[in-house]
Amino acid sequence: MERQLWSLVMLVLILAGQACEVRGLSSVPGTTTENARTVMMLRVRLGEGFRDNTVIVRIDGKEVYRKSGVNTNYTISYAGAVDVPTEAPTVRLEVAVEGGPNVAQDIRPGQTPFVEVRLADGALQFLPLNTEPPMM
């Protein structure tokens, strides 16, 4: 009986996996079609300039990420990332440093699914890209 239950659990997990997003080995966010809707993945990558900051990311006014103690690893120019699924052709991306600067911009995830965010000279900068930036 226990073996049959285990087999049933495995079958359910395999079938459930068929409905999940698929990512390649490069972990590049993909798109999936579900009931004629296209779900796109927007990756917001925190790059250079962060030093023990609290960073907040909002999409269309909704907070999707908040993290304290964000620090850039300068060997790879990376401080963190958040992947945000969206069906909207355009989203309003806002990134803020608590007690510091913020920046907002309309982004088209279908054209630029990656946004590099940098903190330089006391200001946040967006770099929308159509491919994921390499870690240096």
Image: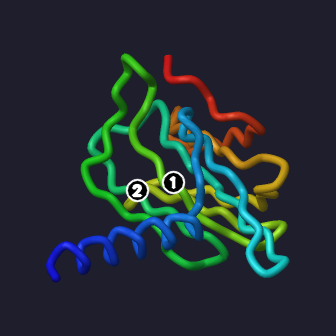
| Crowd tier of the residue under label 1, counting other residues whose Cα lies within 10 Å: few below 14, some 14–19, many 20 or above | few
Residue under label 1: 101
Q: Is residue 6 above or below residue 129?
A: below
Q: Is residue 8 above or below residue 82?
A: below
Q: How many labels does the image show?
A: 2
| Crowd tier of the residue under label 2, counting other residues whose Cα lies within 10 Å: few below 14, some 14–19, many 20 or above | many
**In the picture provided, is 22 more to the left or to the right than 35?**
left
Quadrant, the N terminus: bottom left
Q: What residue type is labelled 2?
A: Val
Element type at marker 1?
loop
**In the picture provided, is 118 more to the left or to the right than 100?**
right
- Residue at the spot 62% in from the left edge and 29% down from the top edge: 133
Q: In this view, does 70 lie above or below 42?
A: above
Query: In this orientation, which residue lies closer to the viewer: 47 or 122?
Result: 47
| Rendering coords of residue 73 (x, y %) | 34, 27
- Residue at the spot 58% in from the left edge and 47% down from the top edge: 23
Sequence-wise, the earlier of marks 2 and 1 is 2
Element type at marker 2?
strand
| Rendering coords of residue 92 (x, y %) | 71, 67
> Gap between marks 2 and 1, in whole Å?
10 Å
Q: What residue type is labelled 1?
A: Pro
- Residue at the spot 51% in from the left edge and 71% down from the top edge: 15
Query: In this orientation, which residue lies closer to the viewer: 20 or 65?
Result: 20
Q: In this view, does 27 lie above or below 41?
A: above
Query: In this orientation, which residue lies closer to the viewer: 95 or 130?
Result: 130
Residue 13 sits in quarter: bottom left
| Rendering coords of residue 52 (x, y %) | 27, 44
Q: Residue 120: which disc?
A: none
Residue under label 2: 55
Query: In this orientation, which residue lies closer to the viewer: 49 or 79?
Result: 79
Kindly check if marks 2 and 1 are in contact, taking CB atoms under 8 A apart as contact: no
| Rendering coords of residue 47 (x, y %) | 49, 34
